[in-house]
């Protein structure tokens, strides 16, 4: 007690030892991160400032790639397609998943069977699911257009008409919302029952209960899902690639399926413009970052955590 | 405390060890000649470059990558086996299922295979990037006769006037295939001779139901894909002139697109699109030509191998030519599969020897017989051994492969950009969004800077 300074040194020594040990134990991750993530990330930024074809040494072009990108029609087209699928697709998919979660949360006999059935499509690989949906969406013999015809609607040429290719993908997306539903279901079951009991005593309607109790209570989950879906939507690739294959061209009919990452892939591996593709990756990073930031900033207004107040 | 010290030491030690291992892996990637152990599957019996000249007796193993899947690999395996049995100083180890992306990764890294089979349009960009060995010296030293190869196939291997690969086989589109029953039902007794005649045939072969929906169509010019090489070739078009100017907007090229567009004007864009999406999958028993939904299409040698026989449901004829240019009779495009040696190959000499073997008449004949493909050595096209009954459906393709009007797209560093631009703009012109001339002018505008730059 008396030798305060000596004790402090001891603590510092022990802390340092602990730190070293801690670092050593986390070193597999740290080393992996440095070599397989940080280095490639930084390298891609360097390459984005060069012309690089994998074989010849990179040639410094400064911001030339970025300048070229902003004059590239296909860059805008692919960005438009990606924003379309993100903005038109994400919110309806989430709303639908929430609706299904609410239904699957109801106390009905055989509920676990319904839950299983509903989750099953999520297990189908993206390529297989896309191929299946291409049959459903076939404009002449597909089940969807047959169904529409039965109620007197002339179905569109889903996979061929450039105005309908992206809606086709979004339609297919509803099928694969099982994971979001399950996570929503978990969140729903976490809402304290006493809130509903109190609301019922006060005579609140189910609708009112949903908006004042359920929705705010699960808002952290909504935020999480929104961010995750946003990111994966900006990286949309597989389904677009498979659908486009039907028209035997990388971007699908009139490039309506040329998503940002597909164009990036084409620039990198078909045209060997690695520098250009790296610049595209960085722009994508910035865009995703901006979207995420905006969502985080506004989230204070609509996300409630149980620990607050 | 000392126990902890020891443990810390041990952990530090192993960390350093693993770090150095990682560092070792990293540096191998950058070295042109990585140690044999670092490369996968290749060079297990490799002799060092120094001992190669003095002791050639030791067998060298070279790695050969192909795009073939297991089910298609039979004929090439047989060929490789034969080589391995007869050659006393080289063993070829083959690896299939190597798609172009995997190939690109391998030839850009430190463990490049010695020889690869790929699609010909990869050769341009890869050669320009410095990944492919220029064969000029090897050809002149060994006395390999370029003239023995079908010119249209050999030309595809040329980038900036140098040969970078050999066309192992080629696919060819200069035939018209048609459904015999559709023809008979429409009262047509022989295939169309000219393109104009084909257009009339298509009208006669197209049927619509009461509500105007197509139930059978004579011909769809962009089925199964927008072909931006085949059509200009048929019209005698070109893509690049001697001065280095790109010529997608040459008169013949534009005409070829206008001709295709005329089918859409005749039968209706929506009707064709809708009908097309309901057609069965090509190459299956539901193939539209087989079911008769589609009466005629551009035939490749691999289409309807059994069905195009004498008594089969599918007829084959030379593809029609423009009536005003009879000299273009027999025109068509070739699309070869190319074998090349990477710049970083460790056994380029042995790979070249194997490549020459692949290009011998014997190997070509053997392979063509088993895989039913078109040989690229002119002499093989007339070889007696191919004229056996079981190979009968190929005969007329061998004959047509001798046509002097065969052509193909010029290979270059920017070939994939060029083809992509052609597809995009042709699509617009076929839909009538812009005129064929405008579309091809757009391509020229877009591609000329690439042609100047690369």
Image (cartoon, coloured by chain):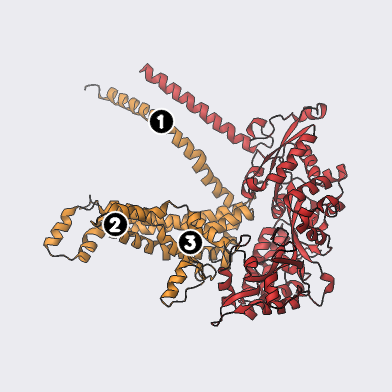
Residue drawn at x 61%, y 61% as measured from the top left: B285
The chain painted red is: B
Residue ID for mark 1? A25
Q: Are marks 2 and 3 in contact (CB under 8 Å)?
A: no
Residue B43 in the image, given as x and y percentages of width and height:
69, 32
Give x and y (percent) for residue B384. Answer: 85, 51
Residue at 77%, 71% (x, y): give it: B320
Q: Position of residue B58 (x, y in %)?
A: 77, 27
Residue for badge 3: A133
Chain A: what color?
orange
Q: Residue at x 83, y 73 (%)?
A: B326
Which of B297 and B417 lies nearest the eye of the viewer?
A: B297
Whichever of callouts 2 and 3 sits on the residue coming sooner in the sequence is: 2
Q: Chain of mark 3?
A: A
* Residue drawn at x 48%, y 25% as measured from the top left: B14
- Residue B159 shows in the view: no
Q: Chain of mark 2?
A: A
| Chain of residue at mark 1 | A
Query: Could you say which quadrant of the image residue B215 lies in?
Result: bottom right
- Between residue B202 and residue A70, name the one nearer to us: B202
Q: Which residue is under mark 2? A: A104
Up-down: is B385 above or below A239?
above
């Amino acid at each position: 007690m008396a030798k305060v300074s000596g004790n402090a040194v001891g603590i510092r020594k022990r802390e340092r030892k602990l730190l070293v040990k801690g670092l050593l134990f986390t070193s597999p991750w740290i080393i992996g991160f440095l070599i397989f993530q940080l280095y490639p990330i930084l390298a891609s930024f360097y390459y984005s400032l060069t012309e690089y074809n994998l074989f010849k040494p990179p040639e410094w072009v400064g911001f030339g790639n970025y300048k070229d990108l902003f004059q590239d029609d296909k860059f805008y087209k692919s960005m438009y397609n990606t924003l379309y699928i993100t903005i038109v697709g994400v919110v309806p998919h989430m709303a639908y998943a929430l609706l299904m979660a609410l239904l699957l949360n109801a106390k009905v006999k055989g509920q676990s069977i319904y839950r299983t059935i509903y989750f099953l499509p999520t297990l189908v690989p993206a390529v297989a699911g896309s191929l299946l949906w291409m049959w459903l969406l076939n404009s002449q013999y597909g089940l969807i257009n047959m169904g529409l015809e039965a109620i007197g609607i002339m179905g569109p040429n889903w996979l061929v008409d450039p105005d309908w290719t992206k809606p086709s993908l979004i339609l297919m997306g509803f099928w694969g919302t099982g994971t979001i539903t399950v996570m929503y279901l978990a969140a729903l079951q976490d809402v304290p029952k006493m809130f509903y009991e109190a609301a019922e005593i006060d005579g609140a309607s189910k609708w009112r209960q949903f908006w004042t109790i359920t929705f705010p209570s699960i808002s952290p989950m909504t935020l999480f899902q929104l961010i995750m879906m946003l990111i994966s939507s900006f990286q949309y690739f597989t389904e677009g690639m498979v659908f486009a294959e039907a028209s035997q061209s990388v971007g699908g009919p009139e490039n309506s399926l040329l998503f940002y990452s597909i164009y990036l892939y084409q620039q990198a591996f078909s045209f060997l413009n690695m520098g250009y593709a790296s610049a595209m990756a960085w722009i994508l990073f910035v865009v995703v970052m901006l979207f995420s930031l905006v969502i985080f900033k506004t989230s204070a207004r609509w996300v409630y955590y149980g620990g607050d107040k | 405390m000392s126990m902890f010290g020891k443990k810390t030491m041990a952990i530090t030690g192993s960390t350093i060890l693993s770090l150095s291992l990682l560092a070792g892996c990293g540096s191998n990637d950058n070295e042109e000649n990585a140690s044999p152990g670092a490369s996968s599957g290749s060079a297990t019996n490799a002799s060092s470059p120094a001992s190669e000249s003095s002791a050639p007796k030791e067998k060298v193993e070279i790695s050969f990558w192909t795009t073939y899947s297991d089910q298609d690999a039979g004929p090439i395996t047989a060929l490789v086996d034969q080589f391995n049995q007869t050659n006393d100083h080289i063993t070829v180890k083959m690896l299939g299922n190597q798609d172009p992306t995997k190939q690109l990764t391998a030839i850009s890294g430190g463990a490049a295979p010695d020889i690869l089979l790929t699609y010909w349009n990869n050769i341009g960009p890869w050669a320009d990037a410095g990944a492919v060995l220029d064969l000029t010296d090897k050809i002149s030293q060994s006395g390999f006769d370029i003239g023995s190869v079908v010119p249209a196939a050999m030309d595809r291997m040329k980038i900036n006037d140098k040969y970078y690969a050999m066309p192992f086989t080629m696919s060819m589109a200069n035939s018209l295939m048609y459904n015999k029953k559709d023809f008979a039902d429409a009262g047509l007794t022989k295939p169309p001779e000219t393109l104009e005649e084909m257009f009339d045939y298509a009208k006669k072969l197209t049927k619509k139901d009461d509500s105007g929906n197509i139930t059978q169509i004579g011909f769809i010019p962009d089925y199964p894909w927008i072909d931006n090489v085949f059509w200009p070739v048929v019209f005698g078009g070109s893509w690049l002139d001697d001065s280095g100017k790109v010529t997608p907007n040459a008169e013949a090229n534009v005409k070829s697109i206008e001709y295709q567009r005329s089918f859409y004007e005749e039968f209706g864009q929506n009707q064709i699109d809708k009908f097309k999406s309901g057609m069965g999958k090509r190459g299956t028993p539901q193939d539209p030509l087989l079911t008769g939904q589609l009466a005629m299409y551009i035939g490749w040698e691999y289409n309807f191998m059994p069905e195009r026989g004498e008594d089969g449901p599918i007829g084959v004829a030379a593809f029609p030519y423009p009536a005003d240019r009879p000299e273009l009779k027999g025109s068509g495009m070739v699309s070869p599969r190319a074998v090349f040696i990477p710049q970083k190959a460790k056994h380029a000499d042995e790979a070249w020897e194997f490549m020459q073997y692949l290009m011998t008449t014997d190997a070509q004949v053997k392979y063509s017989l088993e895989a039913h493909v078109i040989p690229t050595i002119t002499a093989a096209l007339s070889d007696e051994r191919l004229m056996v009954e079981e190979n009968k459906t190929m005969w007329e393709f061998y004959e047509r492969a001798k046509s002097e009007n065969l052509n193909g797209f010029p290979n270059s560093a920017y070939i994939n950009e060029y083809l992509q631009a052609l597809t995009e703009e042709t699509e617009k012109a076929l839909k009538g969004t812009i005129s064929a001339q405008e579309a091809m002018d757009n391509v020229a505008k877009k591609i000329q800077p690439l042609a100047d730059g690369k």
